[in-house]
Amino acid sequence: MKRGDKFLYLGLLLAFALFPLTFRFFAHVRPPRGGFVLEVVADGRVIEEQKLSGGAPRELRLNTSGGSNTLLIENGAVRMVSADCPGGDCLRMPALTDERGSIACLPHRLIVRLRGEREGKDGADLDAVAY
């Protein structure tokens, strides 16, 4: 094995080792043109939809058959601030800022998520169509 071959193999090894890290730096979520919509689902049905906009912080109180939860909406982020469920796991979930996550309160069967607002009708907001 020549000296150049060792450098080539070392370079390839480093490239394969660092490849997954590139997604961390370059994969980001662009906000949709219409902004985000807060969607609250309880028992499999959408019970609340609100456009996420700037402005003063506001609280949203949710009463379900299982109990009550309170969401805080501020600076384009949504987080759970109070819940009367026994575990309180939903209170420790990170705030939602894009479509990549959700907040779930399992005892109350409640899911909070963000989705991009649909702008057009009849598929006008689609980027491409494949057949």
Image: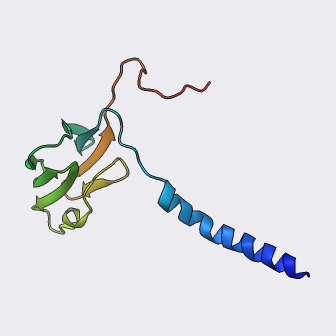
Residue 93: where, in percent of width, then height?
A: 26, 63
Q: Can you see residue 66?
A: no
Residue at (80, 73) in percent of width and height: 8
Depth check: 100 or 17 in front? 17
Residue 78: where, in percent of width, then height?
A: 20, 52
Residue 29: where, in percent of width, then height?
A: 41, 48
Residue at (61, 69) in percent of width and height: 18
Residue at (19, 40) in percent of width and height: 53
Q: Can you see residue 118?
A: yes
Q: How many marks?
A: 0
Quadrant holding the C terminus = top right
Quadrant holding the N terminus = bottom right
**101 sits left or right of 87 in the view:** right
Q: In this picture, is 88 found above or below 113?
A: below
Q: Give the colour scheme of this rendering.
A: rainbow
Depth check: 14 or 40 in front? 14
**6 sits left or right of 72 in the view:** right
Residue 66: where, in percent of width, then height?
A: 13, 53
**8 sits left or right of 60 in the view:** right
The quarter holding residue 41 reads top left
Residue at (73, 72) in percent of width and height: 11
The quarter holding residue 106 reads bottom left
Depth check: 18 or 108 in front? 18
Q: Residue furthest right?
A: 1
Q: In this picture, is 55 found above or below 5?
A: above
Q: Residue furthest front?
A: 4
